[in-house]
Image (cartoon, grey):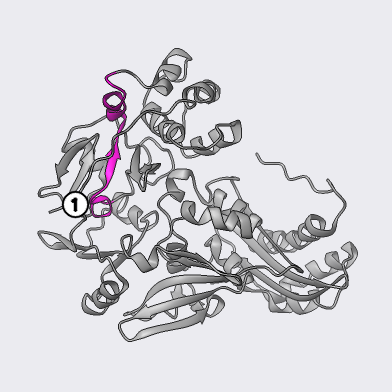
Amino acid sequence: MLRLTINGKLHDTGNASPTMTLLEYIRSIPNLTGTKEGCAEGDCGACTVVRVANNKFQAVNSCLLQLGQVGASEIITVEGIKTINGGELSPIQECLAGGGGTQCGFCTPGFVMALFALGQSAEEKGDWVIHDALAGNLCRCTGYRPIVDAARVGCMKNISYERHAIEAPPYKYRKENQTFYMPKSLNELVSLREAVKGAMLLSGGTDLGLSISKDRVVPENVIYTGHVFELREIVETKGELIVGAAVTYTEALEYIKRLFPSFEELIRRIGSRQIRNLGTIGGNIGNASPIGDTLPCLISLDASLTLASAEGEREVPIEDYFVGYRETCLKSNEVIKNIKIPTLLDNQMFRTYKVSKRYDQDISSVIGAYRLTIKNSRITNARVAYGGLAPRPCRAKKTELAMERIGLDEDEFVELSKQISSDFQPISDHRASAKYRTKIAANLLIRLYRDLFGSENELEVVKV
């Protein structure tokens, strides 16, 4: 039996499929139709609800979440805010209604929930934070200004909320020909991986969720890793950051912002808050896309992966994990346990740059990542990695060697940029031509120089 609370009421999912989306469930079973379906792929935000976890209110895309992922969860929909607020509209609802923040109204419930989550947080509610909170919600009517104006006032007051105790989710949830496994420990996880051949491994679901919501895939067996303690840990030691494979982007950001600020900026461009509250770095690695956003960064930073199975654990440098187009060295009985990222030494610098058609929430055309070790005004060690230039994310080793032979001079970096074509022969596709990709990768090296060693304010990046 799978249970969750929606707007403070306990629900037994009954005969619902474990891979039914939360959006479909709340609209059809409790008949809470305020939550809308727009894109069904986590881009438009019309389906936004709030999940309460660890005393934090997180906006999430209900179109991507499967029921099995929300067992023992507390969910709040737009209908529930009035109940929580003693039968009255919340401050954000009042401000949206009174300030012209809604027209056709289709997107409004999603905006309300995104801003409700922001209002319940302890963050400073400056304009940058408001825009970040709204980045996952699209409105085709208002032009956004009245919505932002409403947020400036309505998010300043949170609403008292009483938590509801729920029993822990079961080990497995079976309906008809589907079984959804929810292991709690690494031992349970690797035992399942060994026993249930061909099962779908699910973490955040921001990628695999599309196969459910868009392609209507009905997997026979799913193993959900979100409750596995060992995969949910973040450990910082003197020399490295260890991030569990099921840690979300949002949870990792606190550490990455402090240790690798450029990496943090990239992660904020991967997706909206709704996506970052679900998606995991382990999932990005497991997907093995040649344009996976975090992968060049982790390769450049010389990260390694701990792979676990019932037979034990092994450590693999992440650059050796990818062996071809969406192919990895992960064995059929293994899982990614964690990612180990060495922290920067005092004489090391790290930068990463992403080029995409849209600045935010878009798949990259090219990503470059660079870790440089500097001594006596020279580069003594360089790790340069790119995504989007080859069938897999990988290092530019010839460029690295050339970089270690030059000084910190812009003209030499301009010459160095020509080396990229000897490392990669990219293809043309609907995202970018081969010529464009090569030119962008070369130009990013010049940008790297101006960013790290150029005069102050020499480089201005305009976000559009």
Which residues are the magenta region?
66-87
**Residue 411 in magenta?**
no
Q: Image quadrant of residue 424?
A: bottom right
Left or right: where does residue 61 sit relative to residue 461? left
How many numbered marks appear? Answer: 1
Residue position marked by numbered label 1 in the rendering: 167
Q: Is residue 176 left or right of residue 87?
A: left
Residue at image coords 29%, 27%: 84
Expressed as whole percent of the image width and height from the top left, the position of residue 204 reads 37, 56
Q: In this view, does 212 lie to the left or right of 331?
A: left
The verdict on residue 82 being magenta is: yes
Is residue 431 visible from the viewing direction of this image?
no
Q: In which quarter of the image is residue 22?
A: top left
Residue located at (72% from left, 76% from top):
422
Which quadrant would the C terminus be assigned to in this image? top right
Circle 1: residue type:
Glu
The residue nearer to you, when weighing 347 against 401, is 347
Residue occupying image coordinates x 19% and y 52%: 167
Image height of 96 relative to 55, above or below: above
SS at badge 1: loop
Residue neighbourhood size for the residue with mark 1, other residues' Cα within 10 Å, grouped as few (<14), some (14–19), many (≥20): few
Given residues 179 and 215, the one toward you in this image is: 179
Identified at 32% across, 86% down, the residue is 311
Give percent across and percent down for residue 23. 27, 41
Location of residue 297 with respect to 198 vertically, above or below: above
Percent x, y of residue 191: 25, 77
Residue 147, position as x, y percentages in the image: 50, 24
